[in-house]
Image (tube, rainbow, N blue to C red):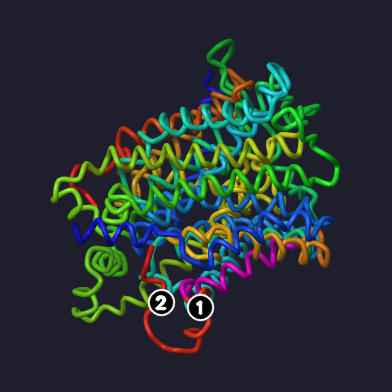
Amino acid sequence: MLTILFDGIAYGMLLFILSVGLAVTMGLMNFINLAHGAFAMVGGYITVLLMQKMGVPFLLCLPLAFIGSALLGGVLERTLYRPLYHKPHLDQVLFSIGLTFMAVACADYFIGSSQQIVQLPEWLKGRTEIGEGALMLGMGHYRVFIIVVCAALTVGLQYVLTKTRFGSQLRASVDDQRVAAGMGINVNMIFLGTFAVGSGLAGLGGALGAEVLGLEPTFALKYMTYFLIVVAVGGTSSITGPLLAALLLGIADVAGKYYIPKLGGFIVYSLMILILIWRPQGLFVRKGGK
Amino acid sequence: MGTQKLLQNQGRWKLWEIPLWLLALASPLLLGSHALIINEIAIVALFALSLDLILGFTGIVSLGHAAFFGMGAYSAALFAKLVMPDPLLGLAFGILTATLLGALCSATILRGTDLTRLMVTMGVGLILMELANKLDWLTGGADGLQGVVMGPLLGQFEFDLYGRTSAWYSLTVLLLVFALARRLVNSPFGATLKAIRDNRLRTMAIGIPVNSRLALIYTVAAAVAGTAGALMAQTTGFASLDLFEFHRSADVMLILVVGGVGWLYGGITGAIVFKLMQDALSSITPQYWTFWIGLFLVVLVLVGRDRLIRPWRWFKPGHSGSQS
């Protein structure tokens, strides 16, 4: 019981880090970016390749994965994404699907279609068990590590968004681009920075999750659905919405796959449809919110 | 009176269309060795036509249209296997189940934003894929539904290996559905759909029941997609999980956009271009042709997709991609 809850929370935290960048893109720039999973995949592959080919230690790979995907995200934002901000949603969907298809084919071509394995360092491999019987809590050390890292990131993000100057400027740009620009805020730079950080977080999530989720070229398409569910269910107006949605989804998915393995992803998708029919703007959005 | 005349004029068949359709119907004879691909093009065109009804004429972005395609295919295949092998009855059964599913799902697209609709439509497709995968005693699971044998069409025309009967069968159905769709979008009902696409709030304000119109057209589109799926299963004698997959929904959207959204011939043009392109590309790079499709999509959006069907505007500055 508790073990499932624990695994669900770890999984949910991971989903949150993976999708928070997407929540920002959708909420901030009103851009439906289906290529977000591709950035996560890039992070995962950076980690795997650095570890296998150059023997870089795992902990060092994580920031490198963040930087690598953030740079890629920044470059793409400046060159390709920016002209599309004010295009219809259909254009954005087509564009980002195209980007995803290209990423999948590229990964297949350059690295191969087989699943990649992440060699975790020894100290992350073990498992600790507390308690007995139905209340037994088994914690994989790597799961603990994921929870700690993701929780720290969440707190950090929340701090940056609510307490810093950059956060205020970002929120101003979200609420009204034109007024924000009139007040002397460089909206373009803010958007560029935010998009890069969002992509970087996706890459970091991909690096962390490569061991749990499995890394192969179809990763970008397979988990795209999950990121989108988190964002759609959580709403894009705050950071707590996606967090709660990710935790809910993580626990529901792990529990569903454990107790009723025959149904697989069925539970998650049905849950999403019901929630979205009930509250189309997202579960945790106040009425009249954006 | 004037409006009615206008609608009638729009709906009238133009002179150039008749030889075009005659040519299409004659193509299995003229290009006998390519009957299989003609059949496939006709089916894909029908599928794209169905998406056009909701995307082009109503402005609803759907990423789960494969759900209805797969539903029609699986029910037609199961009907042939378990009940009787008559193609026309199987087609009717496929259309019926897809219509029911469409009516059921139409409740999901009435509320929310583009994002919500994308998610919900995608979710329905994924759920059906999970179901087809898990109900393996009925659908064959991941191996697909094999051993579908069709009886002769109208009791006379056998489905042969060269696919000539299949091609005529699919082309005829395409022509029929096309004529019906054309009648529909040029009716007063179709005019209200376009009004909803262009300005939903205003449409509501002048007293058009937006929700029931949306639900109705979504159901009709589902029925057409089911028709395409049923044809696919009947002419290939096979149905698999691949029918429900995400890339199928994405492909059909691409096909429609290539051909032109909101124009009934758009789906057909797109299907011809796409299938020929797929044929050519996959013979050059069998494994990585999705890369070129992706590149094509990206370039298409950056250039502005409404320019693709109007080549003389390619190098002119000005607005692009304003329709949705």
Give left or right: position of B186 versus A221: left
Q: Position of residue A238 (x, y in %)?
A: 31, 50
Residue B289 in picture, x, y percent from top left: 74, 62
Q: Residue at x 80, y 34 (%)?
A: B158
Tell me residue B56's x, y (percent).
Answer: 42, 57
Residue drawn at the location 83% of the way across and 67% of the way down: B284
In magenta segment, residue B299 = yes
* Residue under label 1: B303
Task: Say which of B68 and A2 sits in front.
Answer: B68
Residue drawn at 62 percent across, 39 percent down: B229
Magenta range? B289-306
Label 1: few (<14), some (14–19) or many (≥20) C-alpha neighbours in 10 Å = some
Look at the image and say whether residue B112 sits in the magenta stretch. Answer: no
The residue indicated by pointer 2 is B320
Residue B201 place in picture, x, y as percent: 19, 53
Q: Secondary structure at mark 2?
A: loop
Q: Is residue A70 above or below residue B94?
A: below
Callout 2 crowding tier (Cα within 10 Å): few <14, some 14–19, many ≥20: some
- In the rendered structure, the answer to whether residue B316 lies left or right of residue A124 reads left
B51 sits left or right of A208 in the view: left
- Kind of residue at disc 2: Ser
